[in-house]
Image: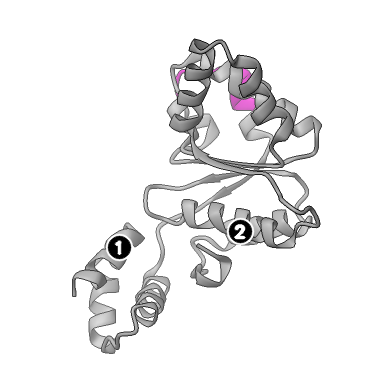
Amino acid sequence: FSFEDFVVGPCNELACAAAKGLCNDALSADHLFLSAGPGLGKTHLMHSIGRLLSARSNKSRLNVACLSSEDFATRLVLAIKAREAARFKSEFREAVDVLLLEDIHFFQGKGKLQDALLLTLKALQARGCKVVLTSSFLPRELNEVDPQMVSCFASRFLALMEAPDFATREEIVRRKARSLQVQVPDDVTGLLAERLTSDIRQLESCLNNL
């Protein structure tokens, strides 16, 4: 995933600009919260951020942690069971330069895990590290989440991504066709864009099948 491959439209223009701003230090915050339904480009933007930050870093090796919230939780639980909690804290709070954490809504109803995540985010913020969180929900829509956690999420730059409009869906089909090195007639492109309206993955999957 890269910014060059990301199709920008009215549905995601703010999110894309914020993502690039985070990489260029033009954003007013070091932390970004991307909210969108499944298949609307959250993962694409998140990986694009990590890729661009790595390419532009003046460090010999930028330590980017890119993982799902479930993976984060699993690593923490395993570290605690192995009595290596200190190693986990050192890895994620002291060694990480950039944290890209996907599907933050996984932490709903998981109080102890929320505490660990909140402490991690505060430690990274104190060090001036960049953090990108993604979720299918806005912070205020999360259930069974500590108010401090909601406040922490809401204090970040929040960018909502919506379903792409017709013109954006057409461009997605064209871009995907070019990447597959196939020619798709305009009427077929229009038909796919007209029928598949809610999920970019559906568009790409249908084109692959064709």
State which quadrant residue 183 falls in. Answer: bottom left
Q: Are marks 2 and 1 in contact (CB under 8 Å)?
A: no
Mark 2 and mark 1 lie on one chain; the one further toward the N terminus is 2
Which residue is pictured at 51% across the width and 29% down the height? Answer: 72
Q: In this view of the protein, which residue sits in the foreground, 120 or 137?
A: 120
Amino acid type at circle 2 is Arg
Q: In this view of the protein, which residue sits in the foreground, 10 or 100?
A: 100
- The answer to whether residue 207 is above or below residue 66 is below
Residue 206 on the magenta segment: no
Residue 146 on the magenta segment: yes
- Residue 120: where, in percent of width, then height? 66, 25
Which residue is pictured at 50% across the width and 70% down the height? Answer: 5
Q: In this view of the protein, which residue sits in the foreground, 31 or 178?
A: 178
Q: CA distance from mark 2 to mark 1?
A: 29 Å
- Residue 121: where, in percent of width, then height? 67, 29
- Residue 37: where, in percent of width, then height? 40, 47
Left or right position of 115 against 199: right
Q: Judging from the image, what secondary structure is the residue with disc 1 in?
A: loop
- The answer to whether residue 164 is above or below residue 171 is above
The coloring applied to the image is one colour
Q: Which mark is residue 197?
A: 1
Q: Which residue is mark 2?
A: 51
Q: Nearer the viewer, mark 2 or mark 1?
A: 2
In the image, which residues are magenta? 143-151
State which quadrant residue 202 falls in. Answer: bottom left
Which residue is pictured at 46% across the width and 18% down the height? Answer: 144
Amino acid type at circle 1 is Thr
Q: Judging from the image, what secondary structure is the residue with disc 2 in?
A: helix
Which residue is pictured at 49% across the width and 57% down the height? Answer: 44
- The answer to whether residue 34 is above or below residue 120 is below
Q: Which mark is residue 110?
A: none
Q: For mark 2, does the 10 Å Cα neighbourhood hold few (<14), some (14 to 19), or many (20 or more) residues?
A: some
